[in-house]
């Protein structure tokens, strides 16, 4: 006599899972902040103002996408802001040499790739911990900018170069916002729909098991460092174009804001879990909070406190809730 | 593992919906002037904000928004400026962290009808309507010799303790000072030495001056490092009352020297006056009572009139003199 046992395909229905997901929580937070902001300031619900507000996060979010993949795979790159500085300095140097906009873009992307490759080689070839390597290269890359520039600035970027940071694609949709959207889709597909994305999760959950299942761990990680460097180069082009000049202090302190964005987006800092939609929502939340508080002329230090409190509460509350429920 | 995530779609929808409804804005005739500083929490700028409030009280229907980033970065200031543009303030008066990086943001502000001026630390001419310098080279050159001469009614020997031989600012100020020396026939400048803006070297040079010229009556140090070192050298040499140290210095660093008598008085810009003038000028431009441009003369209340040069820059006033009567008030400010 045989008994049939059914093993459920899914433990929860898709709807249930969606309702309980991190992204839903973030969406609620985002909507909540949006509503609060529109009540707090009469200037908030203005198309152009909201469009301006997106500049607060688009450049950081571009890097955050790549950083999310890197953190999911169990590594981190703290040198991203310094890569921006070095790429921007190189572009400024290229301007002095008389290069035009297409060449500048190539220089920005190229420096980003080289820096990413440098980090990647140190981590994957020599087996060094990425946090140590990138703390080192954080000082190294920006240090080179300081040596080249000192207290000087590069300026005189070509007029058409300004499009990347100041141009608009359609009505209030800036080039940066459009690029942010396109990159969100690309990274979302890459992480959630491709074998490469599955490999990233597998490595983050258990690198040894991943290696035994035939995933080339070092190669995947190296590609992720390359991608992070490349996105830092993209962000450097946008930021330099927006500022119209380069100083070695450019993008100072951004690495922590980017990591904050990634973690707020639900990416586990221990690796193995996280989604791109989560990071997109986190980017919007951080942008909305800083812009909303800015409209109320709240001092920057209070803003940092609010972002910190938001990060801790969004991460801690669901866990406390789980604990309380299972008690 | 198909994941239907409606979240991104929903966010987009929410954003789109909000864009359609544009709120009505309350229009009143309060002139809102934003004083944007390099970073919040710096005594010098807090004092400037105080001055701006003074101007606001004097002008009446003015609201001062005192704001700035947490650290002295151009990116931080741009975020602040963006939120001010969004609030449609009437004027932005900025002490810039970066001469060039703020230009695109400030140009956008001007495009949207906002008056933009820079003060203290300037913005490139295309990014502002005028720049307010705290003082000018001739005024500073004039002031440093006047401070020394005022204490010497019968004349005497003075010496200069400068920064480095190549310090542009100090060299210009000394040059300007030399131009007005014929107004002080009894004062003799016996020597110029260089302390390289290092405390110990400045101290040694000042000590050397007193040994070489036993009849020396004053040391003029147009550098904040040199003036403190010279005052200490005078104290250590027991020449307080005989040699007067003066020049340009910071009240917080010079309070001890004023107290001991090594320095009778010194000068530097007054942040309160600077904030007052910046707010006053912003008001005049924002209310169309004045127009900026080369050669323009714009009133700034109790500080007189600002005359603009070819770069639309102007000097506020003589450096402000600090002595025993006001050092207590300012030493906690900057």
Image (cartoon, rainbow, N blue to C red):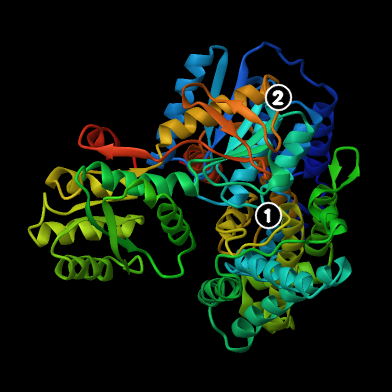
Tag of residue A60: 1
Marks 2 and 1 in Cβ contact (< 8 Å): no
The residue tagged 2 is A43
- Residue A190 horizontal/vertical position (percent): 82, 64
Please indicate whether residue B284 sits to the left or right of residue B138 in the image: right
- Subunit of label 2: A
Q: Camera-side residue: A45 or B170?
A: B170
Is any atom of residue B1 visible in this view? no
Camera-nearest label, 2 or 1:
2
Q: Camera-side residue: A213 or A68?
A: A68
Q: Camera-side residue: A90 or A304?
A: A90
Q: Is residue A131 above or below residue B15?
A: below
- Residue A128 horizontal/vertical position (percent): 54, 83
The earlier-in-sequence mark between 2 and 1 is 2
Q: Residue at x 67, y 11 (%)?
A: B28
Q: Are marks 2 and 1 on the same chain?
A: yes
CA–CA distance between discs 2 and 1? 24 Å
Q: Residue at x 18, y 47 (%)?
A: B256
Q: Secondary structure at mark 2?
A: loop
- Residue B237 horizontal/vertical position (percent): 10, 62
Check the picture and name the quadrant holding the C terminus of chain A: top left
Examine the image and state in which quarter residue B258 appears: top left
Is any atom of residue B79 visible in this view? yes
Tag of residue B166: none
Q: Is residue B288 above or below residue A99?
A: above
- Subunit of label 1: A
Q: Residues within 10 Å of mark 2 (few under 14, many from 20)?
A: many
Q: Residue at x 63, y 84 (%)?
A: A124
Q: Residues within 10 Å of mark 1 (few under 14, many from 20)?
A: many
């Amino acid at each position: 006599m045989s008994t049939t046992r059914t093993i459920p395909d899914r433990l929860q229905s898709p709807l249930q899972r969606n309702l309980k997901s991190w992204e839903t929580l973030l969406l609620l937070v985002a909507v909540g902040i949006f509503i609060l902001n529109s009540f707090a300031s009469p200037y908030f619900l203005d198309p152009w103002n909201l469009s301006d507000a997106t500049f607060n996060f688009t450049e950081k979010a571009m890097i955050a996408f790549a950083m999310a993949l890197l953190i999911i795979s169990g590594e981190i790159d703290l040198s991203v802001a310094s890569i921006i500085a070095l790429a921007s300095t190189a572009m400024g140097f290229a301007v002095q040499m008389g290069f035009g906009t297409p060449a500048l873009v190539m220089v920005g992307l190229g420096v980003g790739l080289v820096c990413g490759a440098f980090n990647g080689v140190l981590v994957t070839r020599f087996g060094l911990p990425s946090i140590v390597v990138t703390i080192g290269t954080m000082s190294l890359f920006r240090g080179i900018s300081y040596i080249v520039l000192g207290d000087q600035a590069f300026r005189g970027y070509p007029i058409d170069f300004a499009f990347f940071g100041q141009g608009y694609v359609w009505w209030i949709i800036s080039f940066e916002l459009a690029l942010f959207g396109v990159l969100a889709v690309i990274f979302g597909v890459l992480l959630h729909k491709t074998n490469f994305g599955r490999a990233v999760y597998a490595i983050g959950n258990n690198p040894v098991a991943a290696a035994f299942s035939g995933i080339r761990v070092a190669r995947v990680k190296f590609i992720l460092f390359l991608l992070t460097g490349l996105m830092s180069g993209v962000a450097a082009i946008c930021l330099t174009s927006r500022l119209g000049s380069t100083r070695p202090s450019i993008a100072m302190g951004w690495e922590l804001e980017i990591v904050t964005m990634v973690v707020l987006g639900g990416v586990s800092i221990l690796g193995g879990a996280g989604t791109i939609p989560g990071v997109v929502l986190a980017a919007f939340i951080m942008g909305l909070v800083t812009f909303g508080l800015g409209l109320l002329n709240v001092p920057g230090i209070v803003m940092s406190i609010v972002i910190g409190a938001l990060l801790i509460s969004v991460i801690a509350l669901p866990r406390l809730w789980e604990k309380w429920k299972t008690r | 593992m198909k994941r239907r995530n409606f979240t991104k779609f929903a966010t987009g929808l929410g954003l789109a919906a909000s864009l359609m409804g544009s709120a009505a804005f309350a229009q009143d005739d309060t002139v809102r002037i934003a004083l944007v500083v390099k970073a919040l929490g710096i005594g010098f700028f807090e004092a400037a904000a105080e001055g701006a409030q003074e101007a606001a009280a004097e002008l009446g229907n003015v609201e001062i928004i005192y704001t700035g980033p947490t650290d002295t970065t151009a990116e931080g200031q741009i975020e602040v400026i963006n939120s001010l543009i969004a609030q449609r303030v009437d004027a932005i008066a900025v002490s810039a962290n970066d001469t060039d990086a703020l230009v695109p943001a400030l140009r956008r502000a001007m495009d949207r009808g906002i008056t933009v001026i820079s003060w203290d630390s300037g913005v490139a001419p295309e990014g502002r309507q005028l720049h307010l310098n705290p003082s000018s080279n001739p005024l500073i050159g004039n002031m440093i010799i006047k401070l020394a001469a005022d204490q010497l009614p019968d004349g005497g020997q003075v010496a200069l303790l400068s920064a480095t031989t190549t310090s542009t600012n100090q060299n210009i100020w000394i040059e300007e000072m030399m131009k007005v020396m014929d107004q002080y026939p009894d004062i003799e400048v016996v020597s110029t030495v260089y302390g390289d803006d290092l405390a110990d070297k400045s101290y040694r040079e000042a000590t050397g001056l007193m040994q070489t010229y036993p009849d020396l009556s004053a040391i003029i140090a147009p550098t904040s490092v040199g003036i403190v070192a010279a005052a200490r050298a005078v104290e250590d040499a027991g020449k307080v009352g005989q040699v007067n140290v003066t020049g340009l210095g910071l009240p917080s660093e010079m309070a001890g020297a004023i107290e001991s008598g090594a320095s009778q008085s010194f000068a530097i810009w007054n942040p309160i006056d600077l904030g007052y003038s910046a707010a006053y000028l912003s008001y005049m431009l924002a209310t169309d009572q004045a127009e900026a441009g080369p050669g323009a003369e714009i009133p700034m209340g109790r500080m007189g009139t600002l005359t603009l040069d070819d770069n639309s820059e102007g000097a506020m006033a003589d450096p402000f003199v600090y002595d025993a009567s006001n050092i207590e008030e300012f030493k906690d400010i900057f």
